[in-house]
Amino acid sequence: MGVTPLMAQYFFDVINSFGLVEDLEGQELRDISAARLVAIEAVRSIIRDDVTVGLVDLVGRVEVRDADRQLLVAIPFSDAVELRGADAVRAAP
């Protein structure tokens, strides 16, 4: 049998124009790279939900925190998607 790599606990807090939504459960992941990918997918999911009601609000971020709640990385909403079109480029933050 192989050795199972240690997993670390990561929390994904959402800060946007509505305020703070703190992740109280977190997820066990292999490393910060995996946590960053989870954060990007979380941002994209939020944006996807916004689009269904005709809104794209790129003001916000997902903060990745460790088990001690120390900030490891922040993913701005605007970094998780590529905007195309003249109007989108002018409106980008």
Image: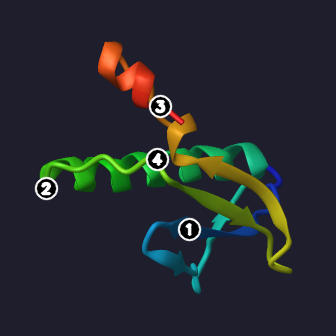
Question: Of callouts 2 and 3, which one flags the residue occurring earlier in the amino acid sequence?
Answer: 2
Tell me which residue sits at (43%, 22%) in the image: 90
The circle drawn on residue 68 is none
Q: Position of residue 58 (x, y in %)?
A: 44, 47
| Residue 86 quadrant | top left
Tell me which residue sits at (77%, 50%) in the image: 32
Label 4 residue SS: helix
Labels 3 and 1 touching (C-beta < 8 A): no
Labels 4 and 2 touching (C-beta < 8 A): no
Question: Of callouts 4 and 2, which one flags the residue occurring earlier in the amino acid sequence?
Answer: 4
Q: Marks 2 and 3, Cα distance to the nearest angstrom? A: 20 Å
According to the image, label 4 marks what residue?
Answer: 41
Question: Of callouts 3 and 4, which one flags the residue occurring earlier in the amino acid sequence?
Answer: 4
Q: Position of residue 80 (x, y in %)?
A: 51, 37
According to the image, label 2 marks what residue?
Answer: 53
Q: Position of residue 4 (x, y in %)?
A: 77, 57
According to the image, label 1 marks what residue?
Answer: 15
| Image-based side of 74 in relation to 38, left or right | right
